[in-house]
Amino acid sequence: MATGQKLMRAIRVFEFGGPEVLKLLSDVAVPIPKDRQVLIKVHACGVNPVETYIRSGTHNIKPLLPYTPGSDVAGVIEAVGDNVSAFKKGDRVFTTKTISGGYAEYALAADHTVYPLPERLDFKQGAAIGIPYFTAYRALFHRAHVKAGETVLVHGASGGVGLATCQIARAYGLKVLGTAGTEEGRNIVLQNGAHEVFNHREVNYIDKIKKSVGEKGINVIIEMLANVNLSNDLNLLSRGGRVIVVGSRGPIEINPRDTMVKESSIIGVTLYSSTKEEFQQFAAAIQAGMEVGWLTPVIGSQYPLEKVAQAHEDIIHSSGATGKMILLSS
């Protein structure tokens, strides 16, 4: 260890496996920003389901071990590397990606993955923007090609991506339907842009949705749990309707004939297929949402770094998400 090198607390993963492989160390070297990089003092970091799949070794992204998880941090610029003109020490920022990992007291990020955080949003809200809002925007506009006046069903609307989708879809003039499994979740969905909300734990909720939308069906379904819902989704769609698969945790049997009469589509989405230019486009729309005021992340469970294993357990197994799960690092 170089003398005088600052140390920090950070979560390190030395082997793939269950939540117990997330180790909190207190002697990790604080990284030093190089060309076009910034160092951020992390106040909060979003926890996303994808981070649990990467940690378990079952995802196609397999980082070199050991590594620190986390892409969505919010905090204050601590230092900037060479050729960084957009940011200076003391700026409030959020990220969509980090180089060194976000489950830590400091995080290194490339300057093009860092964005200014307006004063009206706190750091917890800043940590809830990255993956949820950028994924929601990509799903709605780049994959579903939604148009104002269309009907969108957000299937699993009370978590981070779901609420982001509701806010964006409502702001852009869509008719927004959502589902949630708890009363608290349903209230939050209604408060964040949905015109109507359904309880996906009720046996007959699909019939209630059908009754609500009538013969013409639903133009777009943003699907958070395709391995449970995809077959029902195909029956809810309008002619030319599309299901956008944001999340799936296993296989499901469907009848391909269900797509034929309606000429409907099943379309996957993953944020990290986006180009640098697309990220800039998403950022411009999201920045506008922050300025105008329709973008207001809802914070759910909060955990200190010490409880990160519990956070990874809960994001997969606790039922009925409400808002965005956050790690607090300071």
Image: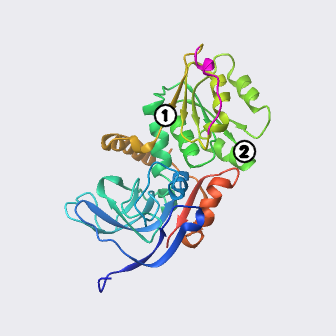
- Say if the magenta span includes residue 298: no
Question: In the rendered image, which quarter is residue 89 located in?
Answer: bottom left
Decide if residue 143 is in sight here: yes
Secondary structure under tag 2 reads loop
Tell me the kind of residue under disc 2: Gly
Please state the horizontal and vertical placement of residue 1, each as a whole percent of the image.
33, 82
Range drawn in magenta: 251-260
- Front position in the image: 234 or 304: 234
Which label belongs to residue 181? 2
Q: CA distance from mark 1 to mark 2?
A: 23 Å
Question: In the rendered image, which quarter is residue 141 located in?
Answer: top left
- Front position in the image: 151 or 224: 224
Q: Residue furthest left?
A: 83
Q: Residue furthest right?
A: 203
At 79% from the left edge and 37% from the top edge, which residue is drawn?
202
**Which residue lies under the disc numbered 1?**
140
Q: Is residue 96 left or right of residue 37?
A: right
Which tag, 1 or 2, sits closer to the chain's start? 1
Please state the horizontal and vertical placement of residue 177, each as a whole percent of the image.
64, 33
200 up-or-down from 330: above or below: above
- Say if the magenta span includes residue 259: yes
127 up-or-down from 274: above or below: below
